[in-house]
């Protein structure tokens, strides 16, 4: 029986690394599959902060994932990274792939956005997934506590307003551009997220 499995966590919890590993393990055994992503930091591929990457199909909002799967049959599996950015309809299409085409779907996504709220895709996958698995790698705040929030920093200040989807850098050493704002993300524990505190100073 095919399964829709949703793996979720914060940034740095190893989601993309595990997605790449599952894709590699299954394809190396001769199974036919698709690797999907949406708004990956390097675009058109799944990339891990460990430096590993693999080309992937970009899931534009207008793409019907069920129709895509039908056009690529026979398939045994689909790996879907950055699933938090999927539309609710695309999440339902992933479930339809499992139920109607009997294809295993492994979805990976962030649990909450920079405002501390569930992404639409995350919420829907939590509602419909056969298995909901929290990533076991515990990312840490600068204070050493378990990180639970993905904070958005604009010019090194934590912000709680703005567009939900904005791709930024996770590198603390990002050099400021000559024009415009520097947007990056940092992991914080609940306490320091609430205080908007990104260092001991």
Image: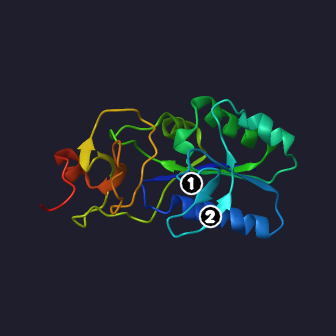
Image position of 182 with respect to 12: above or below = above
State the residue at coordinates (80%, 54%).
76
Measured from the top left, where is residue 37 in percent x and y? 62, 48
Secondary structure, mark 1, is loop
Residue labelled with disc 1 = 42
- First-in-chain label (2 vs 1): 1
Measured from the top left, where is residue 40 in percent x and y? 56, 50
What is the spatial separation of the Cα atoms under label 2 and label 1, in whole angstroms? 9 Å
Contact between marks 2 and 1 (CB within 8 A): the answer is yes
Measured from the top left, where is residue 1 in percent x and y? 75, 50
Measured from the top left, where is residue 195 in percent x and y? 16, 47
Residue labelled with disc 2 = 53
- Tell me which corner region of the image, top left, top right, bottom left or bottom right, holds residue 99: top right
State the residue at coordinates (42%, 35%).
164
Image position of 160 with respect to 139: above or below = above
Left or right: residue 157 compared with residue 75? left
State the residue at coordinates (78%, 55%).
33
């Amino acid at each position: 029986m095919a399964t829709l499995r949703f793996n979720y966590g914060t940034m740095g919890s190893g989601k993309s690394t595990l997605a790449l590993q599952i894709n590699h393990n299954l394809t190396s055994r001769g199974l036919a599959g698709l690797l999907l992503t949406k708004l990956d930091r390097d675009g058109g591929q799944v990339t891990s902060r460990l430096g590993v990457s693999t080309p992937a199909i970009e899931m534009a909002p207008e793409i019907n994932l069920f129709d895509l799967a039908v056009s690529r049959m026979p398939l045994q599996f689909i790996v879907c990274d950055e699933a938090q950015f999927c539309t609710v309809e695309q999440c339902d299409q992933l479930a339809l792939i499992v139920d109607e085409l009997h294809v295993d779907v492994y979805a990976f996504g962030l649990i909450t956005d920079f405002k501390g709220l569930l992404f639409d895709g995350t919420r829907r996958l939590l509602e419909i997934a056969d298995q909901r698995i929290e990533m076991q790698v515990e990312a840490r705040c600068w204070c050493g506590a378990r990180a639970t929030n993905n904070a958005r920093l604009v010019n090194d200040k934590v912000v709680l307003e703005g567009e939900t989807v904005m791709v930024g850098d996770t590198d603390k050493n990002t050099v400021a551009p000559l024009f415009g704002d520097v947007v990056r993300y940092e992991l914080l524990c609940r306490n320091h997220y609430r205080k908007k505190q990104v260092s001991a100073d």
